[in-house]
Image: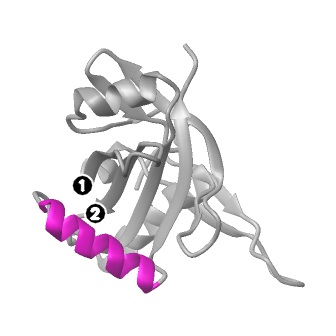
Amino acid sequence: MTDNSIAIRQDEGPGSAPTIRAVPGPGFVVGCTVSTWLHAGDTLAVPVAYVLIGHAPPRRANESAETVETGLLGMVDAMRLRPAAERVPIVGARLILRGPYVALDYGHPRYTMRLPHTSDAWRTHVNSGGHVCLTIGLDPIPPGAGPDAVSAYLARVCATGRAYMGATTIRNR
C-alpha cells in the first residue's frame, strides 16, 4: 500500500502499546465490496440507513487474507469504529452527498470512498439528517451478494466478533 496515512488506536489495558495501522489508499478501496440499504422498521421504529463494507477474497498478487484484514482494520481505526457487540459510537459526519453521488470519508487525508448506487429513499433519509449505521466486516464477501447473502454475512461476522460499527451522518456543506 502506498500513500497511506496512519491510524493509531490505543489498546486498552495496563502497559499496552498503541496499534498503528495504515489507512489504505484507493488501490485497496477499489477492491472493497459495499452494500447500502434503508431499513424502515415497523411503524414505531425510526428508519436507519446502512452501509456495509467488506472486501472480496484476495485476488491480486500482493493480497493475502492478512493484508486485506489489515487494510480493513486501518479503516476501522481511522473512523473510530467499535466491535459490533459494543455500543455503537457516533463517529462524526462522514458522508458527502452531491446529487445522486455519495462518498464516505473513511479517514484517508486525500481520498474518499465513493459508495455504489444508493436509493432515492436512502439519500433522502441522509439528507434530512437521518443516521447511517456503518459496518465493516473482516471476512471476505463476494461482489454481487444479494440481500439474503448480506443478511447471513452480517449475522456471521457479528456473532464471531469480526464486525465493527459506528453511526454517521451527512457532513455539513
Asked whether 173 or 56 is in front, the reply is 173
- Disc 1, SS: loop
Please, which residue is most extreme toward the front here?
Answer: 43
Q: Position of residue 31 (x, y in %)?
A: 24, 55
Residue 152 can be seen, yes or no = yes
Q: CA distance from mark 2 to mark 1?
A: 6 Å
Res 81 label:
none
Is 72 magenta? The answer is no
Please, which residue is most extreme toward the right here?
Answer: 14
Residue kind at label 2, given as amino acid type = His
Q: Residue at x 13, y 62 (%)?
A: 145
- Disc 2, SS: strand
Q: Are marks 2 and 1 in contact (CB under 8 Å)?
A: yes
Q: Residue at x 16, y 69 (%)?
A: 149
Res 55 label:
2
Q: Is residue 131 left or right of residue 114?
A: right
Asked whether 131 or 71 is in front, the reply is 131
Quarter of image, res 17 = bottom right
Question: Which quarter shows the N terminus?
Answer: bottom left
Q: Position of residue 129 (x, y in %)?
A: 52, 27
Residue kind at label 1, given as amino acid type = Gly
First to last magenta residue range: 145-160
Q: Position of residue 133 (x, y in %)?
A: 47, 50
Q: Position of residue 167 (x, y in %)?
A: 55, 48
Res 31 label:
1
Q: Is residue 93 left or right of residue 134?
A: right
Q: Residue at x 41, y 72 (%)?
A: 69
Quarter of image, res 144 = bottom left
Q: Which is nearer the N-term, disc 2 or disc 1?
A: 1
Question: Which quarter shows the C terminus?
Answer: top right
Q: Main secondary structure of the magenta part?
A: helix
Is 158 magenta? The answer is yes
